Image: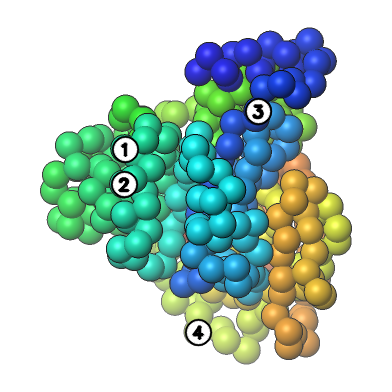
């Protein structure tokens, strides 16, 4: 915290704190599949600040699959090279939802980092990874609204809350569903580098100030949602193949929102078009599939309020019920009528 305050003061004065290392944050990815926005939102926000050194870390050097949608992200480090390069460890580890929640090696590494006092954060159902490692036992935590019952049954030693977009207990923070990644990441940025740095990054990215207020019990699979999902799946002849043509310096928030949201509509599947790999403005390299389909729609990434913009575009393309269905999956207030 002292380092964060000093760093924030130097940045506010326009001084480059060369003598003071930036806080180091490791965001985990995994070849089994990593939730797109859970990874792209923290990376975008922390890297945009210029005050934090952010590394994507995976068990192997191979590009890790993002999901939903069709794209792969290149890790900056493997877990082994990260440990060798940064023997003192990171200041913070962020764990998105990862398909393989039960990797024993990852669990052991997280426990070792926790014992060293590293700040550990899960995004959405990355909470399963922390719970599997035993890091949430005896703590308060949260996760995606739809997995609350499963988490409560599988991990009864955890007090699972539904009344906040993120919950901090000691040196561990857990967040609610996918869209909580942005406000929680802003709050974490303030913790790492100070309020002024956080406000500047939020302003440049077009994001509102972080707000913990939330009621996960308001999110449920209603008749409307299930009917929309069934109807969209059934209309297979109208399904779109969406091209996200990436250019060097692309916006990670907009990319994540588009890849994630359009694919969750059940009316479309989004593909990253990134020949040879394309690197974002914050240094995230994305690969697309080697063989691409014939696309029925090409999207231009919207950099301001990317999730909200994506939901508006979905509503215009497929109707508001589909946009609401996607918002439900993202645990976004649009499901509640924008409240």
Residue beneath the point at 56% across and 26% down:
192
Neighbourhood count class around disc 4 (C-alpha, 10 Å): few under 14, some 14–19, many 20 upward: few
Q: Position of residue 301 (x, y in %)?
A: 78, 56
The residue closer to the viewer here, 24 or 176, is: 24
Can the viewer see residue 210 in this picture? no
The residue closer to the viewer here, 180 or 137, is: 137
In the image, taking residue 207 as reference, residue 168 lies left or right, namely left
206 relative to 105, above or below: above
Whichever of callouts 1 and 4 sits on the residue coming sooner in the sequence is 1
* Residue designated by label 3: 21
Q: Are marks 2 and 1 in contact (CB under 8 Å)?
A: yes
| Secondary-structure class at tag 3 | loop
* Residue designated by label 1: 115
Tell which tag, 1 or 4, sits nearer the viewer: 1
* Residue designated by label 2: 111
The residue closer to the viewer here, 157 or 208, is: 157
| Secondary-structure class at tag 1 | helix
Residue beneath the point at 55% across and 43% down:
86
Q: CA distance from mark 2 to mark 1?
A: 6 Å
62 relative to 309, above or below: below
Q: Which mark is residue 311?
A: none
Can the viewer see residue 196 in this picture? yes
Q: CA distance from mark 3 to mark 2?
A: 25 Å
Whichever of callouts 3 and 2 sits on the residue coming sooner in the sequence is 3
């Amino acid at each position: 915290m002292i380092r964060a305050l000093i760093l924030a003061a130097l940045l506010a004065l326009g001084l480059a704190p060369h003598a003071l290392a930036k806080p180091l944050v490791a965001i985990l990815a995994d070849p089994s599949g990593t939730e797109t926005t859970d990874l792209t939102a923290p990376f975008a926000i922390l890297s945009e600040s210029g005050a934090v050194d952010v590394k994507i870390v995976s068990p192997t050097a191979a590009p890790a699959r993002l999901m939903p949608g069709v794209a792969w992200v290149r890790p900056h480090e493997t877990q082994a090279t990260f440990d060798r390069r940064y023997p003192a460890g990171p200041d913070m580890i962020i764990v998105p939802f990862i398909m393989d929640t039960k990797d024993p090696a990852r669990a052991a590494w997280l426990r070792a980092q926790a014992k060293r006092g590293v700040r550990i954060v899960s995004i959405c159902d990355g909470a399963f990874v922390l719970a599997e490692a035993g890091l949430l036992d005896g703590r308060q935590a949260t996760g995606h609204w739809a997995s609350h019952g499963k988490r409560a049954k599988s991990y009864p030693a955890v007090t699972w809350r539904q009344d906040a977009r993120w919950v901090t207990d000691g040196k561990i923070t857990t967040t609610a569903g996918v869209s909580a990644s942005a406000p929680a990441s802003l709050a974490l940025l303030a913790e790492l580098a100070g309020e002024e740095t956080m406000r500047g990054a939020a302003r440049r990215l077009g994001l509102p100030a972080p707000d913990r207020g939330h009621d996960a019990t308001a999110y449920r699979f209603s008749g409307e949602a299930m009917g929309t999902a069934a109807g969209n799946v059934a209309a297979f002849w109208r399904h779109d193949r969406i091209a996200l043509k990436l250019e060097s310096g692309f916006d990670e928030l907009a990319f994540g929102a588009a890849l994630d949201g359009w694919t969750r509509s059940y009316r479309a599947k989004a593909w990253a078009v990134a020949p040879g790999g394309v690197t974002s403005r914050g240094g995230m390299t994305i690969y697309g599939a080697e063989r691409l389909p014939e696309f029925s729609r090409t999207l231009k990434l919207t950099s301001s309020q990317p999730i909200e913009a994506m939901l508006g575009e979905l509503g215009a393309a497929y109707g508001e019920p589909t946009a609401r269905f996607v918002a439900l999956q993202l645990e976004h207030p649009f499901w509640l009528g924008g409240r």
